[in-house]
Image (cartoon, rainbow, N blue to C red):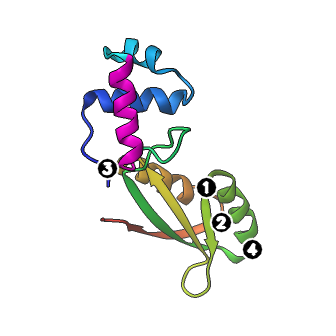
Amino acid sequence: MAKELDKKDREILEILKADGRRGFVSIGKAVGLTEGAVRARVKRMVRDGTIDGFSAIVNSTFKALVLAKLAPKLAQGAIGTIRAFSKEIFETSGNYDLAVFVEADSLEGINRAVDKIRAVRGVVSTDTLLKLA
């Protein structure tokens, strides 16, 4: 899996997240490295899985599954609203009506995503499962 990132790696990733097509020379100037050093770091981050693909999709540090109970009369509207801002959702049966997969770069980001789900009209309650490893 991904090796621990240093400050320069994180700076490179932030630039690539904003503009995945930016050239290594330009990135090097921005972070104070040569083109070759940037190229080697990006190649390593691709090889070790920190970067998932050529478009510089960065692995999220935190992942969670939010289980939501919905008000029956408002369920379809709530599902539509959540679908509009969520990457993956699952309709469930049993104690919960919906499971929402959430990714973020921080625990605070997970909390913001859960709060956003809780704020949707028709969401009665939620429970969150946070991936530990």
- Count residues near mark 3 (Cα–Cα under 10 Å), then give few for <14, some for 14-19, many for 20+: few
Residue at 61% over, 55% down: 86
Considering depth in this image, is 123 or 3 the residue closer to the camera? 3
- Count residues near mark 2 (Cα–Cα under 10 Å), then give few for <14, some for 14-19, many for 20+: many
Residue 58 coordinates in the image, percent (x, y): 45, 43
From which residue to which does the magenta span run? 35-50
Amino acid of disc 2: Gly
Read off the residue under disc 2.
122
Dominant secondary-structure state across the stretch colored magenta: helix
Residue 9 coordinates in the image, percent (x, y): 32, 32
Location of residue 103 with respect to 96 vertically, above or below: above
- Mark 3 or mark 1: whose residue is earlier in sequence: 3
SS for dot 1: loop
Q: Nearer the viewer, mark 4 or mark 1?
A: 1
Residue 110 lies in the magenta stretch:
no
Read off the residue under disc 3.
2
- Mark 3 or mark 4: whose residue is earlier in sequence: 3
SS for dot 3: loop
Read off the residue under disc 4.
73
Read off the residue under disc 1.
86
Q: Nearer the viewer, mark 2 or mark 1?
A: 1
Q: Mark 4 near mark 1, Cβ–Cβ under 8 Å?
A: no
Residue 97 coordinates in the image, percent (x, y): 61, 77
User: What number is the disc on residue 97?
Assistant: none
If the image is split into quadrants, where does the C terminus sit? bottom left
Location of residue 76 with respect to 94 vertically, above or below: above
- Count residues near mark 4 (Cα–Cα under 10 Å), then give few for <14, some for 14-19, many for 20+: few
Q: Is residue 70 left or right of residue 49?
A: right
SS for dot 4: helix
Q: Mark 2 near mark 3, Cβ–Cβ under 8 Å?
A: no
Q: Nearer the viewer, mark 2 or mark 3?
A: 3
Residue at 65% over, 58% down: 82
